[in-house]
Amino acid sequence: MFDPVLFALLVVSSLAVSVVLRQRRRSLPPGPKGLPIVGNIFDVPKEFEWLAYERWGKELRSDVIYVNLAGTPVIVVNSAEAAHELFEKKSSVYSDRVRLPMLNELVGCNWHFVFMGYGDDWRERRRVFHQFFHPNAAVAYRPRELKVARELLQRLLESPDDFMVHLRHMAGSLILGVAYGIDVQPKNDPYIATAETALHAMSMAGNAGAYLVDYIPLLKHVPSWFPGATFKRQAAEWKKATDAMVERPFEAVTKAMAEGKAHPSMILSLLNDLNEDEDKEHKETVFSGVAAAAYTGGSDTTVSALGSFFLAMLLYPDIQRKAQAEVDRVVGRDRLPEFSDEPSLPYVTAMVKEVLRWRPVTPLAVPHRLTSDDVYNGYHLPSGSIVVGNAWAILHDERMFPDPDRFLPERWLNEDGSLRTDMRDAELSAFGFGRRICPGRHLAAASVWIGMTSVLSIFNLEKARGADGNIIEPSGEYISGLVAYPKPFQCLFKPRSDLTAQLVHNGLQECD
Ligand code: HEM
């Protein structure tokens, strides 16, 4: 029988349920409380933000958290599972970038596809890049990777104190060779110097939140002479440096081509393969931008990874000995390591993975941007949000990496000493996420591997001693930034035998 009271109750309760559900659907992920208007601007630390994001995630018991930066929604992704759900499974809406007027429009770095919005221009460049850096293509660069690693050994023998300078030279030399076929000068190379100036300019201009014009893009139209428009004059200076980095090595290749002297390189192949019916000017702009992107993407990052490796070897001498024992067993003491040794050196390979996990080079990768509303675990993720993959939190997740702050290559190995294959998602987060994942990672992993293995085979890395004879403990501290680096520390590179200099000399000759 029809009961109007019961019917009314049912209607009211189902309405209530749907309102609650809709509210739940609309409710944002948890986050720190924040203030009116400015939101969490004062909560987010200026340095090592990834640690605060990780802590909030734990306190709020959510692997996705919400931060409000003066009205700009920021979603932080703190677990490998959530990263997979969002960046991978829904990659078509999680692959855009944030607009950066200071860096892209005023300093003119819109040639760099790392900062490009998700669309055809980005796709065209990523495709060109991929052609030269996918796993099979990247194998072609091994001879050059081997050569720069052995040059690193030579330099460490000559002036060990300058090890960070040598790492920069090694990374620059590799990319300039691969991209442009340029053989750099042993000291004060002009191309490396130009690129270093440009990289500095880019890191200053790309400093999120440092320029008002990034919040109010209309300010870019303010004339340079206008009082307070220092940022425009500064941008013009920086533009000169970044333009030089894009143009000079490219022009060197076209000049060498005209003279019939160009060495094999990415740019040479691209220009040689250009069809007459293609828009030459457009293509040259694309090619020169892609090559410069390879330089900027690959230099600081490789330096940071190898810097962290040196630091780890000082802090964990037992692990250094263990890795050296493996190298000695497989390679012996009368030659230098080669890529063909890699399958027989799982401990060293595990150590490369551990370096990239222990001190992630890019702890927050590069922020993505969400281009449509989404829902995760019932939480509403608004379109236009900046989406930050917290690689640090993922790579320090105790569920997968117990005692995460400890440097322990064994965690990447099975009991029989072979490499584990079940931690791929977490491992990959060291190189970013989804469709934007680092396209240079195969070259990076190989060059870091041969760099580490070569250094281990030739040197014992030891802590320095002060004038009083006491050991100088490295602080183990880092410089915060898009790319995080160990703070300067001292490290001794002690040749492991009397044959070292001869071995390095022979090894270099084999590469010529
Ligand atoms: C240890 C070394 C390296 C690390 C840790 C690293 C890390 C990253 C990360 C985190 C991103 C952003 C991913 C994202 O948005 O989610 C990225 C992008 C990029 N990387 Fe790397 N990278 C390394 C080496 C290299 C090398 C050697 C090259 C060049 C040969 C390179 C070229 C690029 C480029 C061009 C992009 C832009 C991709 C895009 O936005 O579509 N990287 N890298």
Image: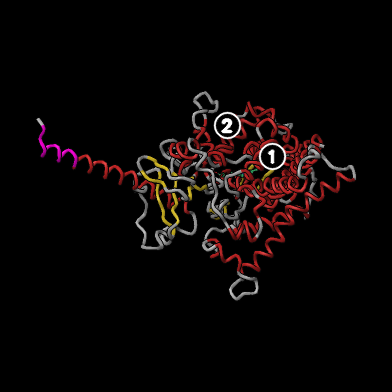
Task: Say which quadrant the C terminus sits in.
Answer: top right
Q: Between residues 162 and 178, which one lies in front from this camera angle?
A: 178
Left or right side of 72 for 184: right
Res 480 quadrant in image: bottom right
Separation of disc 1 and disc 2 at Cα?
35 Å
- Callout 2: CB less than 8 Å from ligand 1: no
- Specify few, some or many for label 1: CA neighbours under 10 Å numbering under 14, 14-19, or 20 or more: some
- Range of magenta residues: 2-11
Q: Quadrant of ligand 1?
A: top right
Secondary structure under badge 2?
Answer: helix
Residue 10 is a magenta residue = yes
- Specify few, some or many for label 2: CA neighbours under 10 Å numbering under 14, 14-19, or 20 or more: many
Q: Between residues 426 and 270, which one lies in front from this camera angle?
A: 270
Q: Dot 1 corresponds to which residue?
A: 128
Task: Say which quadrant the N terminus sits in.
Answer: top left
Residue type marked 1 = Val
Q: Position of residue 282 (x, y in %)?
A: 73, 47
Q: Dot 2 corresponds to which residue?
A: 347
Q: Between residues 120 and 262, which one lies in front from this camera angle?
A: 120
Residue type marked 2 = Tyr
Q: Residue at x 76, y 41 (%)?
A: 278
Whether residue 326 is situated above or below residue 363 in the rendered picture: above
